[in-house]
Amino acid sequence: MEYSIYLYIILSVLCLLIGFLGGFLGIALGAIRLPVIIIFGIEPIIAASTNLLAVIFGSLAGLLPAIKQGRVPIKSSLVISVPSMIAAFLGGYFAFQIPELYLIIIMIFCLIISGLVMTFYKISENEKRDETKGSVREFFVGILISYFGGTVGLALGVLRVPAFVYFLRMNIKTAGGINLLVSVLVGISAYLGHSFSGGLDYYLIISIVLPTILGMYLGSRFVKIVDDNQLRKVLGITLLILSAILLVREI
């Protein structure tokens, strides 16, 4: 199917903005990008495969500045990312056994709770932990969220970052940096397991993936100058907006 040049331009601008916000928060925001792409009339199977590419390359673009800024501790990243990649593949493999509606309802509930907590609850300094050490909790948090993400077909950084901050007591900027690495690996795993029976639209890939890469790179560079509490509130509001979008979409 061929699409209008104006559609490609509109999607490019929107994906640039979504990418900037995603790089700023350390989240690929595929859960926002995918509905936007579909709303504009793109076939779902093409939209899904294109969105996965945007998640992979966009997260990679945001990851590079995060590494330079020291926001990706190696040990914690490995403890979380390796099992997460395996869990995402298994989640996708067994996804057919769980009704999609149930998964979406659970995800909306988690987004609302995460959004409210991120917006209104503040972690005191004595609650924070050493982010350079891996732990058993990191291992299991990564597995649970990635398995769930595999079943719904998303990297689910929107749930992973709040979990890192409030269950693992990470600084939000470090949580975002680690999540970008996990999103790259989980995205690759999901992409390899994805069916491309609907084909690819290369103009669509260019208009979505390239602006996402640029936006996430710029957003990730900008995050250093923002206060942690302000960043948590922005993320919380973003999660609440996303939960509303998903709820309206299901209704």
Image (tube, rainbow, N blue to C red):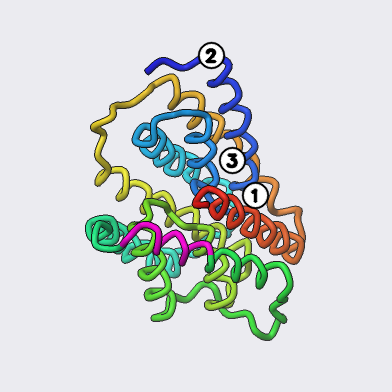
Q: Which residues are magenta?
A: 99-108
**For the residue labelled by badge 2, is the local secondary structure a helix, a strand or a loop?**
helix
Answer with mark 2 or mark 1, whichever residue precedes in sequence.
2
Query: How many numbered circles are shown?
Result: 3
Name, please, the residue furthest toward the front: 251
**For the residue labelled by badge 3, is the local secondary structure a helix, a strand or a loop?**
helix
Magenta: main secondary structure equals helix
The residue that disc 1 covers is 24
Residue for point 48% across, 28% down:
41
Residue 234 in which image quadrant? bottom right
Front of the two marks 3 and 2: 2
Amino acid carrying mark 3 in the image: Gly
Amino acid carrying mark 1 in the image: Phe
Residue for point 56% across, 64% down:
111
Front of the two marks 2 and 1: 2
- At label 2, counting other C-alpha atoms closer than 10 Å, the crowd grade (few under 14, some 14-19, many 20 or more) is few
The residue that disc 2 covers is 5
Q: How many angstroms separate mark 2 from mark 1 (CA)? A: 29 Å
The residue that disc 3 covers is 19
Pointer 3 with pointer 2, Cβ within 8 A: no
- At label 3, counting other C-alpha atoms closer than 10 Å, the crowd grade (few under 14, some 14-19, many 20 or more) is many
Q: Using residue 36 as the reference point, say whether residue 104 is left or right of it.
A: left
**Residue 105: in magenta span:** yes
